[in-house]
Image (cartoon, grey):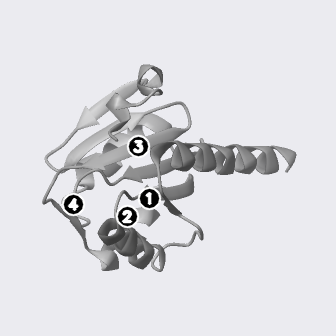
Amino acid sequence: MTITNSNVASQIVKQTQSKVGTVHFFNHIAVIEFNEGTHIDINSVKKTLKDIRNYFGDSKPFGIVANRVNSYSISLLDVKDARRTLPNLAAYGIVSYNSATRMNAEIESSFCEWKDICFNNLYEGLDTIYHRVNGNQLISSLN
């Protein structure tokens, strides 16, 4: 299910598009839907990363949900480089809709610093990432 066809579509604050896909912004989460057949690497996502950084800034904790409604490839060796451009990324998750995308998400998770990033539906992913981001805010506000 695309985010625009979900029950939370009315809560989208902003959207940006690039050659590789669309980013849907909420208060604490960015949902990325990459285009069918796209290859994702550090060069192809420069605009996407810039849009995310412009929206959230350098200090506000946020989360990303990759909503895999389409099939695409990703350069796993670029994951850490992309992560470094978003210093305040507090949580990351991947929503997969079939066994092939689930397997890809599990492989991708081995290159991430977070555990339990694979979700079976959009609402589970959004809810979990939202709570992980808010948990980070509560912990950081105590320091």
Q: In the rendered picture of this protein, how many numbered marks are placed on residues?
A: 4
Q: Which mark's residue is nearer the viewer, 3 or 2?
A: 3
Q: Which residue is mark 1?
A: 94
Label 3 sits on a secondary structure element that is strand
**Mark closer to the chain start, 2 or 1:** 2
Q: Which residue is mark 4?
A: 71
- Direction from residue 84 to residue 50 in the image, left or right: left
Q: Quick check: can you spot residue 61?
A: no
How far apart marks 1 and 3 lie (CA) works out to 10 Å
Q: Which mark's residue is nearer the viewer, 1 or 3?
A: 1
What's under tag 3, amino acid-wise? Val
What's under tag 1, amino acid-wise? Ile
- Direction from residue 14 to residue 18 in the image, left or right: left
**Mark closer to the chain start, 3 or 2:** 3
- Direction from residue 81 to residue 89 in the image, left or right: right
Farthest right residue?
Answer: 142
How far apart marks 2 and 1 lie (CA) works out to 16 Å
Label ID, residue 82: 2
Q: Residues within 10 Å of mark 3 (few under 14, many from 20)?
A: many
Tell me residue 47's x, y (percent).
Answer: 24, 47
How far apart marks 1 and 4 lie (CA) works out to 13 Å
Tell me residue 52's x, y (percent).
Answer: 39, 43
Question: Which residue is at 47% across, 73% downward?
Answer: 109
Q: Quick check: can you spot residue 83?
A: yes
Q: Which residue is mark 3?
A: 31
